[in-house]
Image (cartoon, grey):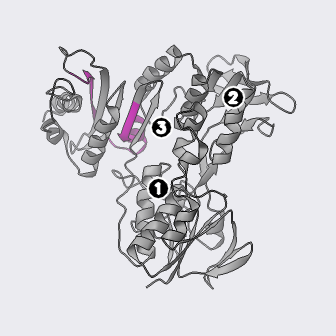
Amino acid sequence: MAERIVIIGCGAAGATAAMQARKYNRKVDVTVFNSEAYSQYSRCGLPYTISGKVREFDDLVLMPPDNWDMIKVDAKLGTTVSAIDHDKKTIHYEGGELQYDTLIFATGARNADPPIKGLDKDRVYGLRTLDDAKALAAELDKAKHAVVIGGGLVGMEIAEAFKERGLDVTVVEFLPNILLAMVDPDFAMIVERHCAEHGLNILTNTAAQEVIGDATPTGVKVVDRQSDEERVVPADFVVVATGVRANTELAEKIGVQLGSTKGIVVNERMETNLEGVYACGDCAEHVEFITRKPMSGGLGTVAVRQARVAGINAAGGDAIFPGIVGAKVTKLFGLEIASTGLTEDMARRFEVSVTKGSIKGSTKPPYFTGGKELKVKTYYDKESGKLVGGQLVGMEDAAMRINVLTLGIQQGIDVVELFDFENCYAPAICDTWDPLVQSADAARKRLKR
């Protein structure tokens, strides 16, 4: 039985692992290190500190520092682990060393900058930490033009935040559409049109080549990938949101194995290849739920579920993480975008042959005022008929429906079972035939089931 647990990282994964280890084992010593001076806070809430939907930066702190003492966890904030001697099971940090029986890497990820000239200028930012958000919020008082490089979830949420605060904002996306890790191109185009109607400039299929200016940006030189046309987009500051890279350096030095996604390879118990060493959250590579192929998480919901398993097992328990489904949702200018499981592109890459059920439904019966259009797409394995993915775009009620689809994937339901799903009904809330059921019906006919 472990007597001393050391956790490196105090984000969503590290903090959850510490709390779950303490909850499972009241006697074990738990120490958590965090290189940032802050205790656990919501990274997903950072864009909303800029828009003002989160009033104060401190409101994002989920675990106030004093609370660690209350649950008897030694939280060493603002403290960086410099080295690990796994043979002696010793952590070295500024000011001392500490022995462990079990070790959890919850070291997260860092922004991965693309090969673009001029990113070393002042007023070029990423958005990963609370300090990043504070620096970006300060731009509201002095900037008029912003360029966001990257049209994924973080990039689009940042762009919305600055647009809502009155700035001229341009998103530069290298791929043919935004949000392609989340939705198919046809749904992405719906989102693009909606954002354009709210004044957001989106340049897709466009390569950012250089941040121009002297010490600070005056613009970003971009090239249209189809026409090769060059132009300069005005910018007082630039945000780079082109993805992240797992922080694995400490783990690599003690011989922890990395996988194809460059994350730490773990099994269903969140164990690495080294005995007594676990990993969870953005630094870890697990498997996609349906295909069991390697996949990185990159989601707070995945991080805390992995961390629960790592914390319990490091404290002597026996918990299991089932794999990453990848349920995602965001809201841009009032439009909800939600997805889960495989997209069409992911199905192709993972070599899963799928059938689609696609419908345009409504959140309420057609005779009831106030219903909103809801576009729904669900995917099923052609051979088994099992549900493997889904996407929704609409002005309301997308998130809860995507949760239904995620549960369906986890429970292995097929197209007939989703069609037979008995949904609730009241005219003021939803229709007798839910759009999810209608999408299953469309696919069921194609599959002849």
The residue to which callout 2 is attached is 140
Type of amino acid at the residue the image marks with label 3 = Ala
Judged left or right of residue 386, residue 161 is right
* Label 1: few (<14), some (14–19) or many (≥20) C-alpha neighbours in 10 Å: many
Identity of the amino acid at label 1?
Ala
Question: Which mark identifies residue 181?
Answer: 3
Q: Earlier in the sequence, mark 3 or mark 1?
A: 3
State how far apart marks 2 and 3 are (Cα).
29 Å
Q: Over which residues does the magenta segment extend? A: 337-364
Q: Is residue 165 magenta?
A: no
Which residue is at 36% across, 41% downward? 340
Residue 342: x %, y % from top left: 37, 41
Q: Secondary structure at mark 3?
A: loop
Please tell me whether mark 1 sits on a helix, a strand or a loop.
helix
User: Mark 1 or mark 2: which comes first in sequence?
Assistant: 2
Between the residue at mark 1 and the residue at mark 2, the CA separation in whole angstroms equals 32 Å
Horizontal and vertical percent position of residue 275: 50, 79
Q: Is residue 79 above or below residue 163?
A: below
Q: Nearer the viewer, mark 1 or mark 2?
A: 2
Image quarter of the N terminus: bottom left
In this rendered view, identify the residue nearer to me: 198 or 409: 198
Residue tagged 1: 303
Q: Dot 3, how many residues are within 10 Å of its Cα: few (below 14), some (14-19), or many (20+)?
A: some
Q: CA distance from mark 3 to mark 1?
A: 18 Å
Can I make out residue 126 in this image? no
Q: Residues within 10 Å of mark 2 (few under 14, many from 20)?
A: some
